[in-house]
Amino acid sequence: MLGSKPLKISVLAGAAAVFVCRGAERIYVPVPDAETRDRAKEGIAKLPPQRQDLVSFVDTDGDVFDRVTEYLRPLGMQARKWPEDAFVGFMVDFLYEVALASKYKIPIASSSIHTVRGFVAIIDPREFTGEARFRLAECISLICDYDVDVIDHGNLNIDTPSCARRSPDIWRFLDFAEFREVTAATGALGYLKIPSVGLRRLRYAIGEFLQRPEAKPVLSTAQIVADVAGVKQADKLAKLAESLGVLSVEHFRPPFIPLGPVEIGLYRSALAEVSPEAEPPEGSILAFERKGGVSWLNVGDELKLDREAANLVPIKNDVIAARAALSRFF
């Protein structure tokens, strides 16, 4: 706040310096709407000219954000009270971050995994029915796939996903949810009316086929037949597979590397650069916008962040509690 007026600023310039300190070579910023994009541009303008190409904008058309919100729509329609409604709201950020990080194969500078994990043990699965219950199960499986550890780079907490080959895949959830919606509404061949949905489903079918040992002789035969016929179709086959995203055997599972206690200093320094008189809302030490709404930290919460950074036990206990609650969902 600056007097009685709300003050909105970008912390991108300060965050970029923190990320570079932690070894980042490129920073990806989601800008699904015009307001977010304009504010991000303001942050880039504060960077020195030599560093402005460090930042890349992603999801500029909001397509990924729209797909995530559409995926969560059945849960949002049935979540009528706390904590279920809060859980769905925070899941927007979590799934959006995982989806983009999986797409661009980058880690996530966020603590959203900690937030949604804290709800797993207290939400009531009986509040959700039908398709919403299945999507809730997918969300819970994705959350509980992460474990917490510490890396020796400023004593950072890092949440890493399981190394299991069948680890939950956010894009598989999104793609199959769209496919099921289309086929349920228009019949088994309804996806032909929406080719993009059909192609996404086909990608997994081709990928699973190419990973089978028996697929290799078939591909070799196709190469020989094409060569004998004098038609170089094998290259086209490879390009088709690449365009469908099936040449990579495993999907990328992004780790979470939150800012931790440095986040408070980052917001305070950004406010101080605008005006030394800028202050957070009364009773709080900062407020920040998320895609799911506005969050804030109350006075005294900075001590909690410091303790969490120094003590991994409470976070590990949250992981154990969340996984212990899986019997209520599956």
Image (cartoon, rainbow, N blue to C red):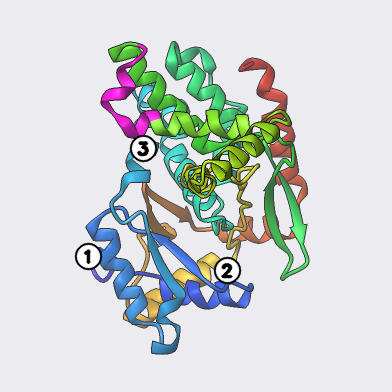
Q: Nearer the viewer, residue 149 or 230?
A: 230
Which secondary structure is most common in the magenta stretch? helix
Dividing the image into 4 quarters, which one contains the C terminus? Answer: top right
Q: Residues at badges 2 and 3 in contact (C-beta under 8 Å)? A: no
- Cα–Cα span, label 3 and label 1: 37 Å
Q: Is residue 236 above or below residue 258?
A: above
Task: Verify whether residue 34 appears in magenta.
Answer: no
Residue 166 visible in rendering: no
- Cα–Cα span, label 2 and label 1: 27 Å
Q: Where does the magenta region start and end? A: 188-198
- Cα–Cα span, label 2 and label 3: 32 Å
Question: Residue 55 appears at what percent x and percent y?
Answer: 43, 72
In the image, taking residue 39 as reference, residue 47 lies left or right, namely: right
- Res. 38 image quadrant: bottom left
Q: Name the amino acid type tagged 1.
A: Ser
Q: Name the amino acid type tagged 2.
A: Val
Q: Nearer the viewer, residue 58 or 127?
A: 58
In the image, taking residue 166 as reference, residue 46 lies left or right, namely: left
Q: Residues at badges 2 and 1 in contact (C-beta under 8 Å)? A: no
Which residue is identified by label 3?
A: 67
Secondary structure under tag 3 reads helix
First reached walking from the N terminus: tag 3 or tag 1: 1
Which residue is identified by label 2?
A: 262
Mark number, residue 4: 1
- Res. 272 image quadrant: bottom left
Q: Name the amino acid type tagged 3.
A: Arg
